[in-house]
Image: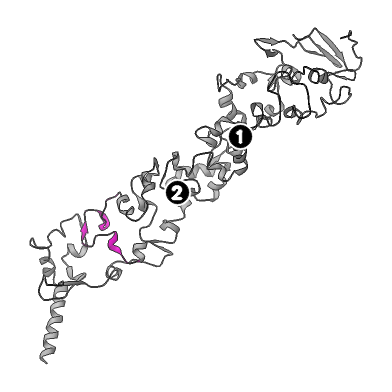
Amino acid sequence: MKMFSLLSAGIAGLLLFASDPALGTSCVTNECHAALPAVKFPHAPVKEGECGSCHTPLAKEHPAKGGSFALAAKGEKLCKECHDLGGNKKVQHAPVKEGDCTSCHKPHGSNARYLLEVGDDRTPLCVNCHDGAPFKAAYMHGPAAVGACNSCHDPHQSDEKKLMKGPVRNLCLQCHADFAASMKEASFVHPPVAKDPCTACHDPHGSGVAMFLKKKSPDLCVNCHRKIGAQVGKVKVPHKPVVAPGGCSNCHSAHFSKGPKLLPSTELELCLNCHGKDNVGTPALKNIKTQLEGKKFLHGPIQKGECKGCHDPHGSDNFRLLRGKYPAELYATYQDGIYEACLKCHEKNLLRFAETTIYTKFRNGNRNLHVVHVGTRKGRTCRICHQPHASDGEKLISKDGAMFGDWKIPINFVSSSTGGSCAPGCHQKFNYDRQKPVVYRPE
């Protein structure tokens, strides 16, 4: 009976400790734990003096050798008495899964919200476990730069990988709302942008490359565009914008565009941004814009607003990025293949037969005058007589003439219904006629 009375008194004492705020308050007297509630955000039980909510006395006297108190429950079980920790989602933060709440939260209180050991910049807390290198990169994503990890990640649990608060693509567009609106209006969207998460190209934390790209362009782009990557890597003449800082983005929009091929404007307008200026490149390129202005006749591709019909926009093994072989020299006697750039569109037999009635109209009777000019010992290239882009002369025949050193060779071409004549600086005036051949004096 006496034993029962003693046991009852002990239980009553424990209950008294757990329920009496005065006892809790006594824990934080000046002589003992006064610093615990002296923070901006004390844990609720500490604030209310309810120490017995978490601590259970082990001995009548305090302090006692070996400890006077024990936690009312171990690990997360104690926190779950008040907090709903969930645990029903696919991905749990490791400390939550292990029930180690105090690895992030201070159990009694803190000067930071949520009883964390840090303020709004969560970086110092997170890099205790996570790699801190991305947070020291030259170019940082805004949330990562200010340590706002919780803007993208849930600190406890999620149904998304990496504890993301939602699907990556949706999460990005919630902030980049202006980007999302513009993308809806675009006619052409880069497939990775339309389907894949933004992290396919961007590091979500930081990178050594501008716009926190995972790699610089064109290295990043050729991960997918392998054929172009192989081409640029081996051509003799790469297009300079491709290998310049900015790479592919110098000509293409990385995300979306109103024009095909993700070009920000029409093809011709884009090319003339550089090729419509004086003194571009070394040696300086010609100002194509001035060559086109006011001209009566335009080369076929130019009429369609295209440059790629003749030039490869990424790189080529040929002079002037041409898609086929063409002599860089002013004189080059015709051989199969060396005029490929022109003959892939124009009559392929134009220069193969000294006599013909079908392959050219530039003939005296059956005599092929193209062969006379290009196929002789000192063959003249097409550009001596023809302009490659535009001219006031029909057949793109140059009215001003081609440069020959410091002199422009005049062409002085005049056409007729059955032939014509020319009086260039390289020979006297000659007439030709397809129906009634002109008889020339012995050469």
Mark 2 — residue? 172
Q: Could you give the CA–CA distance between mark 1 and mark 2, rounded to whole angstroms?
A: 32 Å
Mark 1 against mark 2, which lies toward the viewer? Answer: 1
Would you say residue 64 sits in the magenta stretch? no
Query: Residue 291 in the image: x percent, y percent?
Result: 64, 19
- Disc 1, SS: loop
Would you say residue 108 sits in the magenta stretch? yes
Query: Residue 159 in the image: x percent, y percent?
Result: 44, 61
Mark 1 — residue? 314
Who's the residue at 39% across and 55% down the image?
153
Contact between labelled residues 2 and 1, with CB atoms less than 8 Å apart: no
Quadrant of the snapshot with the C terminus: top right
Q: Amino acid at mark 1?
A: His
Quadrant of the snapshot with the N terminus: bottom left
Snapshot quadrant of residue 209: top left
Snapshot quadrant of residue 67: bottom left
Q: Is residue 263 above or below residue 159?
A: above
**Magenta stretch bounds:** 98-120
